[in-house]
Image (tube, rainbow, N blue to C red):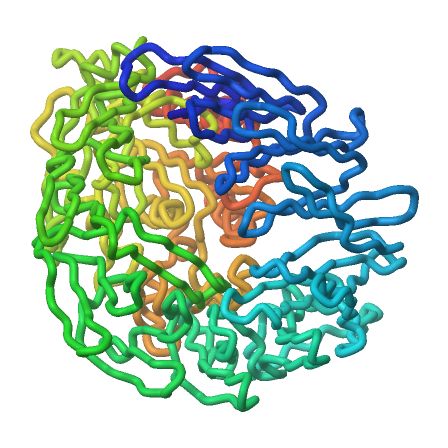
Amino acid sequence: MSFRKFYDENVDTLMVFNSLIPERPVGIRVKINNILFLPNDYLLLGGNEKAELWNLKTQESTAYSHVQKIEHIKSKNLFIIHYNDALDNMINLFDGRGKLLNQIKNVEHFVTDLSGRIYAVVKQGTTYSVVRIDQASTEKLYSSSRRIYYITPEPKENGFISTEYLPDGKTQELIYVDLLNKKEYPLKNDLPLQFGYATVETFETDHNSFYLKLLLHPKPQETPLVDIWYGNDKQMEKKVYPDAREVYYLWTPQKAEIKQIGNSKLVRSVNINNSRYFLAFDIHKYNNYLRYEIQAEINIYDKTLAKYTVMDKVWESLYVSPNGNYVIYKGDKKWKLYEVSTQNNFVFFGPEDAKPYFTTDGKAILFEGKNGLWCFNIRKKTLVQLQSYPGSTITLYNAKNNVLFSDIGFSVYSYEIDDRVPLLCKLYNDQDNTTAFMLIDLNKKIVLIPPTEKRINNLIYNPSFTRYVYTDENYNLPTRIMSMNKNARPIPLYQSNQGDKKILGLKQEIIHYTNAEGIPLKGILYYPISYDKNKKYPMIVRLYEIQNKTSNEYLVSAFTQNRDGFDIRLLLEKGYFVYKPDIVFAQNGTGLSALDCVTHSLDALPVNASIDKTKIGLIGHSHGGYETNFIATHSDRFAAYVSGAGNSDIVRSYFSFNYNFHSPFYWQYETGQYKMKKSFKDDRALYFQNNPIYHVDQVNAPILLWAGKKDENIAWDQVMEFYVGLKRNNKSVVALFYPNEGHSLEQFSARKDLVLRTLDWFDYFLKDERDIDWINSEMKKNAE
C-alpha cells in the first residue's frame, strides 16, 4: 500500500508499506504523481518527467527519464511509457516485469479500449495517423491531414471515432472509421453543424450508434448598448455564461442517420446506457429560484419511435439503473420507480433520507440511510428491512457511485451495488459521534470495526474482504494507518507526527445544553495545551452550524488547511481555550437564533475559574461570519471579534444576484442555509430584526473583518459595508481585503497572512500584547 504525506506547501512525499510489516516502510519516494500497483509485487511510479518500475520484494528498480505519461493495462498486465519530445514522443510497451515488447515514435497521445488494445495518434510531418498497437504488431488504421484531438474506440473494436480540428483550430469534426468495411463516415455529411467541442459515448449493447454531446460555437455578437434583464427569465445562468449551449445527438454512421435528443425546451439530455431510451429534460420550466434544488420535467426519448414521453416532474436528483431500464426518484415523500420501456410508475413508501442502489443482477434496489438497510424487490414490488441499526446512518462502502449529469440544483446518478459479494457497511451515529464497519454476507453480520469514537477514514480492502487498511485519529491522537485481517485485531502500520507529544495531554469536554426552544445541542470545549488549573486563560468561540461531529479530528497546525484564518492548534498552543458550540435556527430568525444558541452554550460551560470570562473572542467565516456580525451587534459577552466573508446586510443580500449560484439569492433565505422560511414581503420585521447592519452602532468590541475581492458567493462589499458602518459610528475596526482571493483563501501566502493576523488580533485584545504595529495603527489613532 502507499500513502502521501501532506505538508504546508507540498504533498510530494510518497511512502510505501508492506501491510504485514508495521512501522518500517518498504521505501520512500518524492515528487510522484502517478502510482500503479502491478501484479507480482511490482510498483510503477511516475512524476516529474520520470518513471520507475520498482520490485517491492527484491528492491530492484528500473528508472526511466523524459516521461510524460504512464499507464497500466490491467487486463493484460502490460504497461505503457510515453516519452516526451526529448525521445521523439516514443511509446514503449512493456510486460509486467519490464520487458520491452513494442515501440513506436512520434506519438501525440493514445487511448486503450476495453480489451486493452492501444490506439495511438502518430504525427509525421503534417500527417496524423491512428495506429493500433499490441505486444507483437503495429497496425496503421487511418490518416488525416488535420490534427486528431481524440480517439473513441467502440466496445466491439469494429471501428472508432476520430475527433479532429479543422484548420481554424477552433472547430471540431468527427469521423467514424469502419475497420470492417474500410470506410470513413464524416459527421458533417449527416450533420452540417459547426461546434467547438465534442464528447462521444458508446453503447455496449449497440456498437453501431454513438451518443454525441456537442458544444456549439457562440454566435459573434457586438457588445450591446444595453443588457436587458426580464422579470420572467428562467435561464439566468446565461447572465454568467451567455454563450454556453450544448446539443445532443444519436448518430448511426453506417445508416447515415442522425437524431437530435432534446430541443430548445428540453435543453439537457443524458445517456442512460440504453441504446433505445434516453433522458431529455427541461430544467427551466418550473424554475422560480425559490430553492437551490431545481424541479425538472423529465422526458423519455424513444429512439425507435422518435417520440418523447413525459415521465414526471422531479426535484433535485434521480437515479438510473446500470442497464437504463429503470429510474427511481422521490416525489411527495414517496419513492417512484419508473420502468422506461413500459412507462409504468410504481409508487411506494420507503426510507426518506436514503440513497437507492440497484443491484448488479437488476432484480432489487438497496436503500442506505438512517436507522437501517432496506431492500426493494423490483419484480414482487415488496420492501423489506434487511438490517436495523437504530440511531445510525448506513453507507454502502463498496458501492459504485456514477454521476451521469450534474449541474447547479439537479443531478442524475447511476448507483450500483454488486449483490454477488458481501456488503461492506459504514455505520455512523451522530448522537455520540461514533463510527463502525460491518460486513454483511447472506444475513450474517461480521463486525469489522466496533463502534469507536475515533475518526475512521480511507478504508481500503482486497477483493476477498479478508484484509483492510484504514486511517484512524482523534483529537488527542495523530493520524495512524491501521492494518487488519478479518476477525483479527487491527495493528498500527504507521503513526504520523510521532514527535507530537503535546497533543497526547490535550483535554476536551463535550458540553451539553439546549436552546430557548429546548432543542438539545452540544459544544466542544478544548483546553489549552500545557493547561495549568491555577492559571487564567482567554477563550475563542468559533461559530458555524453543527460542529460537534468534528470532536474527533486530529488537530494539526497547517496553513494549507486554514482557508478562513482559524487555526485551532495554534490557538491552543498559544494558551487559549477554544469552544465550538452547535447552532440551529428557530422561528425568530437566523441571527437571533445564533445569538440564543451561543448565549445558552456559554451559560452551560462548567464553573471553571481558568476561563477568563472578560477575555472571550468570537470568530466565524461565511455563514459564521454573518453570525459573528449579528452577535457583535447584540452581545456584550465578547472582547474581540474576527469575521470573514460574512453578510452584513441580509436585506440587500436577499435582493441581490448571486454570481456563484447564477441566480437571485432570495432562495438562500427562504429555503436555504438562512432558514428564514418566509419571504421578505411576508415578514419584513423578521429580516429587519436579523440584519446586522441595522444595529451596527451597537458593536462594543474591536472587530477584524476580511474578504476576498473575487468572492462571487458573498459579495465582498458586504464586508466593506459593515466596515463603513463601523467607521461611521467610530468603532474600532480593521478590514483586510485580499485582491486575488475568493470566498475562502487559496494562496498559501494569503492563508498564512490571515492566520497570523487573526492570532495577532486575539493576542492584542485578549492577552494585552500591545506591541503589534498594524493593530496599533488603528488603536492609537482612536486614542488620539
Give percent across and percent down for residue 227: 72, 73
Image position of 317 with respect to 261: above or below:
above
Residue in the picture at 50% in, 64% down: 407
Query: Residue 263: where, in percent of width, then height?
Result: 61, 83
Q: Residue at x 54, y 36 (%)?
A: 72
Res 781 visible: no
Camera sees residue 457: yes
Q: Nearer the viewer, residue 281 or 632?
A: 281
Q: Nearer the viewer, residue 131 or 583?
A: 131
* Whole-percent x, y for residue 375 in the image: 18, 65
The quarter of the picture where residue 348 lies is bottom left
Image-based side of 484 in relation to 183, left or right: left
Q: Quadrant of the N terminus?
A: top left
Residue 655 vs 42, above or below: the answer is: below
Front residue of 634/430: it is 430
Q: Describe residue 756's horizontal placement relative to residue 767 as left or right.
A: right
**The quadrant where residue 383 appears:** bottom left
| Residue 5 rendering spot, x and y as whole percentages | 43, 22
At 70% from the left edge and 40% from the top edge, which residue is drawn? 137
Please give the name of the residue rendered at 28% of the width and 31% of the height, measured from the top-left corner. 470
Residue furthest out toward the right: 125
In the figure, is residue 183 to the left or right of 288? right
